[in-house]
Amino acid sequence: MDFSIKALDAKNTIASAKSGCIVVGVFENKKLSKAAKALDGAGEITAALKSGDITGKAGTTLLLRGLKGAAADRVLLVGLGADEAVAEKAIGSAINAAIKALGTVASTDAIIALPLEEVKGRDANWAIRCVVLAGRDAVYRTDAQKSKKDPAWAGPKKLALAVANNAGNKLALSQAVAIANGMELTKDLGNLSANVCTPTYLANVAKKLGKDFGFEVEILDRKQMEALKMGSFLSVTNGSEQAPKFIVLKHKGGKAKDAPTVLVGKGITFDTGGISIKAGPGMDEMKYDMCGAGSVLGTFRAIGEMGLKSNVVGIVAACENMPSGRATKPGDIVTSMNGLTIEILNTDAEGRLILCDALTYAERFNPAAVIDVATLTGACIVALGHHNSGVFARDDDAGNALVDALMASGKATGDTAWRLPIGEQYNEQLKSNFADLANIGSPGGASCTAAAFLENFTRKYPWAHVDIAGTAWKSSAAKGATGRPVPMLANFLIGRAG
């Protein structure tokens, strides 16, 4: 789907705009938006409201054909709710409903003339991004590995937004498209089967991103990881035939002296649980255990397209977690890259074992901040469901500022997160009689003890941990990767770049 801006003025009005369909808004109190009024010369829209054909409730729709006085073939009415100030929730519902309704309109193009620049508490940038992300999500298909493809999007291929053609809106549109492209890459990687999306596959994707956008890319193999003494990471790879990959991308968009922001992604391309093997039902969804890695690659796709004026490093720790005669066993003790020894009480708590060495590796970049992203704990789903990602950081000035910025970015993009605690009390649960710490804690607060484990490897820089176990993919009929938290991360980096 292609997006553009359609600036309307006294000479080029909504009534004279030629299009397969124009989308306008109406309210529950039977009032019309400005665009709807401009198309209601014959009173047909007012009549539809009075008759009850459309109520104006947020998200309701009605398609009208051959409207008198409109150059467009069709006019799609969309409810904006009761608030004439155009509430954020109402416009969000209206945008999603409009995109869904447009899927049944056989037209090559459409104009969104909803009041995108009049949303209470928001600016046009937010609304533009909502339209772009909803539109791209509607046309996205999960049929890459099917011999017979799913039905294609039947609606308009070109979508114009009736907003002012100024520099701010142009930038917002280009950024929204870049974020949508990043989300699509993240979805594609998550949805691929694990026999295709291996650690080597992720490494090749990183190399292609490097060629396309000028990133520096370095791929470390097992021997190089052994030389770095990444004993914790390598313990997870022991049972697999797939070669592990440690992937480093560098986007040098800022000044050479500027400290980079480092993104670290968990890339378990398939997680059986290892010797602590998972139950069979639902195990197919463990191909999504690399969504942290996928979101880092997707975010790099977005910032590369945007040409972000900032230094960003991406680290992807990629491997499989498989059972075999060589696999790490419960009770084994391994030594991490920073020298701490770890008693592995459960081999299904493997994400933290690869991330801890990646977080130690991040020290070499003298980072301004490090954010790790991982489908880390089922307990995070218990705590927050599938609505919010979990965010953790130390309770200090740097940690609090980092969390505040991430949560604000999540709110701005609809990719929301909620803070959960860590602290010494959770570290107490990780004590081991035989090693410096255990890889799982005593019962209770499993998401918090997992984050507390990682915190032990991050004390040389500002750090935040984002647990996306509940937000990275959907199950059941809507099964598939969501592309989260690319919007939150990309918008966060945009903010840091100024």
Image (tube, rainbow, N blue to C red):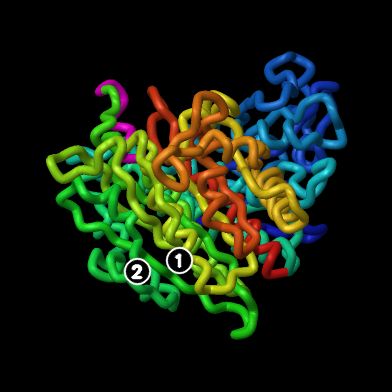
Q: Which residue is mark 2?
A: 228
Figure label count: 2
Q: What residue type is disc 1 on? A: Tyr
Answer yes or no: is residue 71 visible. no
- Within-10-Å neighbours for mark 1: few <14, some 14–19, many 20+: some
Asked if residue 149 is positioned above or below residue 167 in the image, the reply reads: above
Q: Name the quarter where the C terminus is drawn.
A: bottom right
Task: Label 2, secondary structure: give it.
Answer: loop
Residue drawn where x is 17% and y is 40% of the image: 147
Residue 137: percent from the left, percent from the top?
Answer: 49, 42
Label 1 residue SS = helix
Q: Which residue is drawn at the image coordinates 63% and 26% (left, top)?
A: 62
Choose between 158 and 142: the one closer to the eye: 142
Q: Residue furthest bottom?
A: 256
Determine the residue positioned at 67% across, 65% down: 171
Q: Earlier in the sequence, mark 1 or mark 2?
A: 2
Q: How far across and down, in percent of the image, does residue 118 sit?
A: 82, 45
Give the image quarter of residue 460: bottom right
The magenta span reads 280-288
Q: Residues within 10 Å of mark 2 (few under 14, many from 20)?
A: some
Residue at which label 1 appears:
361
* The furthest residue to the top: 51
